[in-house]
């Protein structure tokens, strides 16, 4: 209602409130704040990204996808939006497109462990275990304490018969999360 009278600094403050609500798990309030912020400044890549996260938390995947795409259209280097779009596409079984988005994300930020992890997950789903191992290993290089990445690496090693290596990785995972 009052959005027409607000300026860009107000949009940032409203966006920050939305992020705070999001971090508290108050997604409906986050959604309202972020939508208000977008009405003031529709060209904020970060607000579109945050809206995508909130919509995803609310299981509104089409709206999440639209906001991630808007974020990327505004800032093509927003690697987190590319990554999250890839996750949504994977859920829709669009594995080829998801893989493209994740690869775009790590091209922008090569040390992005989550992007490498997601590439590994897709390769594992496609039974491309050698490629999955490469991606999980790359992810571990940047985040060695990820239980999920270590267990997925161990599982991929197991699938190709590298039992000794798999055991080492599983033991490491158990040290991370006993």
Image (cartoon, helix red, strand yellow):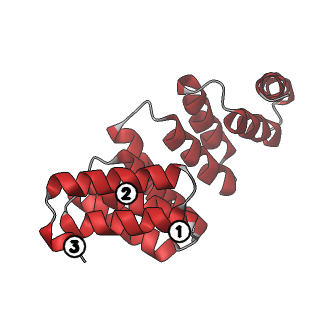
Q: Residues within 10 Å of mark 2 (few under 14, many from 20)?
A: many
Q: Position of residue 128 (x, y in %)?
A: 65, 49
Which sits in the foreground, 45 or 80?
45
Residue 49: image tag: 2
**In the image, is 107 to the left or to the right of 138?**
left
Which sits in the foreground, 11 or 178?
11
Q: Position of residue 101 (x, y in %)?
A: 42, 55
At mark 1, the secondary structure is loop
**Residue appearing at x 45%, y 61% in the figure:** 30
Task: Judge depth for marks 1 and 3 and give the one in front.
Answer: 3
Check whether the beta carbons of the residues at disc 2 and disc 1 lie within 8 A of each other.
Answer: no
**Where is mark 1, residue-wise?**
94
> What separation in Å lies between label 1 and label 3 (alpha carbons)?
41 Å
Quarter of the C terminus within the rendering: top right
Task: Judge depth for marks 2 and 1 and give the one in front.
Answer: 2
Occupied quadrant, residue 93: bottom right
**In the image, is 71 to the left or to the right of 85?**
left
**Where is mark 3, residue-wise?**
2
The answer to whether residue 72 is seen in the rendering is yes
At mark 3, the secondary structure is loop
Which sits in the foreground, 152 or 156?
152
The tag earlier along the polypeptide, 1 or 3, is: 3
């Amino acid at each position: 209602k009052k959005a027409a009278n607000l300026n860009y600094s107000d949009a940032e403050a409203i966006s920050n409130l939305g992020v705070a609500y999001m971090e508290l798990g108050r997604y409906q309030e986050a959604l309202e704040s972020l939508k208000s912020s977008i009405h003031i400044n529709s060209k904020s890549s970060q607000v579109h990204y945050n809206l995508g996260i909130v919509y995803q938390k609310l299981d509104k995947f089409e709206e999440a996808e639209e906001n991630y795409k808007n974020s990327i259209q505004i800032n093509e280097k927003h690697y987190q939006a590319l990554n999250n779009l890839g996750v949504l596409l994977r859920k829709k079984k669009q594995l080829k497109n998801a893989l493209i988005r994740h690869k775009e994300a790590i091209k922008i930020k090569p040390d992005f462990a989550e992007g490498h992890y997601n590439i590994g997950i897709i390769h594992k789903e496609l039974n491309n275990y050698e490629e999955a191992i490469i991606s999980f290993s790359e992810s571990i290089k940047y985040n060695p304490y990820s239980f999920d990445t270590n267990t997925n690496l161990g599982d991929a090693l197991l699938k190709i018969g590298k039992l000794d290596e798999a055991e080492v990785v599983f033991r490491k995972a158990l040290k991370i999360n006993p």
